[in-house]
Image: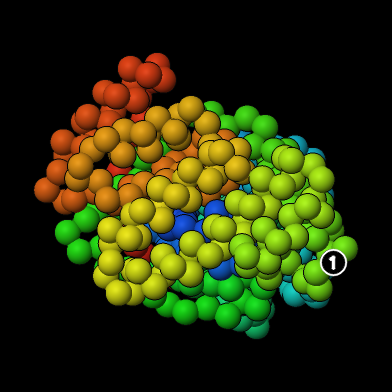
């Protein structure tokens, strides 16, 4: 695959590429819609992601090309950039913009991107593109950024340049991921522990709903606002900075402070999900996969009924998993509104599972899902 990409690079730009970088996507094992509420999440990097081939040019121009999209951009090196459309290249362009804002120097580059993550499927294709770009520029122009600086910078790109108020989980997982491990991350302090992700005789299955995501960004921002409203209501009495500073006991004792029933349900999800992450990480570390699986199902239930970010497609997948004895746990992963679900499937049964879930889903939804078994890969690097 890489040889092919190198050939394409040479054909597109009339020169050989000099460097190749790779950033993965991620799955979140549990802890959904928690990062922007200052709690615990448990993501892992996957082995699919974004490849970036680069070579300097003498023209003082950034040339963006992708094998995934026809749109391309040639733009001179300048002091600042703005997002003016929905094209893919605004993600890496946003990275350049924010590096410039931090006083870093960059020069003209020829850039070829190739992604093998399903795009917009909740596996963080956008964080993968942002992080691979930031990492590459930092290496090529000696930016002096640490991995954590890269995480913070790319989050800023997503929040300020792209305009999605997402939390820090995706960029963190894509940057800090380790092979075979999950990251237990405290999104408030950014303290983290690397947890062995020993799935024993199970595969981690990723099931893509293949539902085109519409309105996902505005719905996402709506949830962020609802959580802010819940926090403000609780702060009338409680001295807390984040919803996740509150345990469920304190929450239930004070929930009358929240008068809007929708906002109340959102807060309940966040506070209980945060506690589930703690229990799930412990179960994983102690090889109690059955318990881990039950927490996954409970998480999905809460995302469906309290947080309302699932949908008939994701629910259909989890419904099938519940009825299939060789699945130990399943849930939607990522922001929701379509995208992917994950499931722990017994290795022996994986083929049968893939076939049967595809039939069940297609009958109910009207088109097929995609089913993969995924390895847990490492974070961004130069190849
Ligand atoms: C998206 C966001 C993350 C996180 C998840 C939900 O992936 O980018 O920051 O909020 O949704 O857990």
- Report whether the residue tagged 1 is closer than 8 Å to ligand 1: no
Place of residue 379 in the rendered image (x, y in percent of width and height, measured from the top left):
45, 68
Residue furthest front as drawn: 253
Report whether 233 appears left or right of 322: right
Residue 359 visible to an observer of this rendering = yes
Q: Going by the image, does 54 lie left or right of 96?
A: left
What's the colour scheme?
rainbow
Q: Residue at x 41, y 56 (%)?
A: 295
The C terminus, quarter of image: bottom left
Residue 127 location, quadrant: bottom right
Q: Which residue occupies 71% across, 61% down?
A: 253
State the image coordinates of residue 356 (x, y, percent, origin top left): 22, 29
> In the rendered image, is residue 122 in sight?
no
Q: Nearer the viewer, residue 360 or 110?
A: 360
What residue is drawn where x is 35% and y is 69%?
283
Residue that label 1 marks: 237
Task: Decide which of 195, 284 is in the foreground and name it.
Answer: 284
Callout 1 crowding tier (Cα within 10 Å): few <14, some 14–19, many ≥20: few
Q: Is residue 57 above or below residue 139?
A: above
Say if 181 sits above or below 122 in the image.
below
What percent of the width, then of the height, locates residue 31?
52, 59
């Amino acid at each position: 695959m890489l040889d092919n990409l190198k050939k394409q690079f040479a054909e597109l730009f009339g020169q050989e590429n000099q460097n190749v970088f790779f950033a993965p996507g991620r799955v979140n094992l549990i802890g959904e819609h928690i990062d922007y509420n200052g709690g615990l999440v448990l993501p892992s990097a996957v082995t699919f992601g974004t490849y970036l081939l680069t070579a300097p040019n003498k023209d003082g121009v950034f040339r963006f090309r992708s094998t995934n999209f026809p749109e391309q951009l040639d733009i001179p090196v300048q002091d600042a950039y703005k997002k003016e459309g929905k094209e893919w290249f605004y993600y890496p362009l946003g990275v350049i913009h924010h590096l410039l804002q931090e006083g870093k120097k960059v020069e003209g580059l020829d850039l070829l991107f190739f992604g093998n993550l399903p795009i917009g499927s909740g596996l963080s294709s956008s964080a993968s593109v942002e992080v691979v770009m930031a990492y590459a520029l930092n290496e090529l122009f000696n930016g002096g950024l640490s991995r954590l600086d890269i995480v913070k910078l790319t989050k800023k790109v997503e929040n300020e340049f792209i305009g999605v108020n997402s939390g820090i989980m995706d960029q963190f997982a894509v940057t800090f991921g380790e092979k075979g491990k999950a990251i237990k991350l405290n999104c408030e302090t950014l303290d983290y522990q690397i947890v062995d992700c020993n799935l024993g005789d199970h595969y981690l299955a990723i099931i893509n709903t293949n539902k085109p995501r519409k309105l996902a960004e505005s719905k996402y921002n709506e949830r962020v606002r609802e959580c802010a409203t819940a926090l403000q209501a609780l702060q009338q009495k409680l001295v807390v900075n984040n919803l996740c500073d509150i345990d469920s006991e304190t929450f239930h004792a004070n929930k009358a402070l929240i008068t809007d029933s929708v906002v109340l349900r959102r807060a309940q999800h966040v506070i209980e999900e945060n506690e589930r992450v703690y229990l799930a990480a412990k179960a994983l570390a102690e090889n109690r996969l059955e318990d881990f699986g039950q927490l996954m199902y409970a998480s999905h239930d809460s995302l469906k009924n309290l947080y309302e970010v699932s949908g008939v497609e994701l629910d259909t997948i989890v419904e099938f998993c519940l009825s299939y004895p060789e699945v130990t746990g399943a849930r939607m992963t990522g922001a929701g509104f379509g995208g992917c679900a994950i499931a722990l499937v017994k290795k022996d049964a994986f083929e049968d599972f893939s076939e049967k879930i595809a039939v069940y889903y297609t009958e109910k939804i009207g088109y097929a899902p995609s089913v993969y078994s995924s390895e847990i890969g490492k974070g961004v690097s130069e190849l």
